[in-house]
Image (tube, coloured by chain):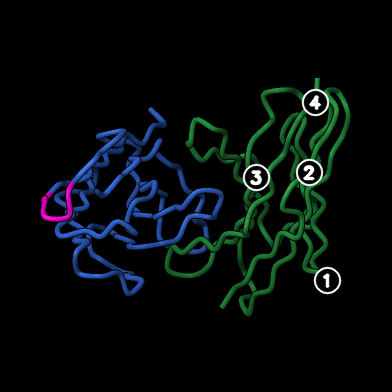
Amino acid sequence: AQTVTQSQPEMSVQEAETVTLSCTYDTSESDYYLFWYKQPPSRQMILVIRQEAYKQQNATENRFSVNFQKAAKSFSLKISDSQLGDAAMYFCAGGTSYGKLTFGQGTILTVHP
Amino acid sequence: DTEVTQTPKHLVMGMTNKKSLKCEQHMGHRAMYWYKQKAKKPPELMFVYSYEKLSINESVPSRFSPECPNSSLLNLHLHALQPEDSALYLCASSRGGGKDTEAFFGQGTRLTVV
């Protein structure tokens, strides 16, 4: 079984600043993948970044990076140089056996100009 | 082509109607999914098809009936729905059905049951 928890229902950031979204997870599996998805008002879920649990190195994708703390079961997303287009709902998710994604409750990110 | 295409984008149906949602992908993915999403909530998994066979049914009511005619297509047949079934229905696909479930999502069908 896997659980994913996002404790920040809403966050806000000024344009060009940095913001960190938190996520914790719990799983009984030894091998798993973690993901951050973005869902803007257009509705489409877009993959932002992924992390394989067996990799020590934190994933980075342009302005997006993760802080993966395996022992603490923490998987936070850092957005640098925030842009207005980053405003969206962000979901943390874990990949489990049999093709099932488990999502957190989501964090609504507002970007102020 | 990295798209998952869903049709229609919007659907309004009465409780006695029968309708179908369609999903198509041409990425060679072997796993396809239906999710239901209420406003400001995470997607809830409904069904998983792996290699065209139903592998997960998350105790979904029988008024929702999935179908996978081939590896590129996924349908969701709707019959005798209730107003509480109004939601965004998302289709997704991934390379496989294992732990590497990096899913690509369609834009969804906004369903309203009246």
Front residue (pair B6, A108): A108
Marks 3/4: CA–CA distance = 17 Å
**What is the C-alpha distance between the residues marked 1 and 4?**
34 Å
- State left or right for residue B94 relative to residue A37: left
Percent of width and height locating residue A32 = 61, 65
In the image, the segment drawn in magenta is B14-18
* Mark 1 or mark 3: whose residue is earlier in sequence: 1
Indicate the chain coloured green by its letter. A
Is B15 colored magenta in this rendering?
A: yes
Do marks 3 and 4 share a chain? yes
Is tag 3's residue or tag 4's residue first in the polypeptide sequence? 3
Mark on residue A11?
2
Which of the labelled discs sits on residue A112, or is there none? Answer: 4
> Mark 1 and mark 3: span between their CA atoms?
23 Å
Mark 1 — on which chain does it sit? A
Mark carried by residue A71: 1
Amino acid on which the number 3 mark rests in the picture: Tyr
Q: Which chain carries label 4?
A: A
Q: Which residue occupies 56% across, 49% down?
A: B40
User: Mark 3 or 4, which is nearer the eye?
Assistant: 4
Going by the image, does B6 lie left or right of A6? left
Is the residue under label 4 in contact with that under label 2 (CB below 8 Å)? no
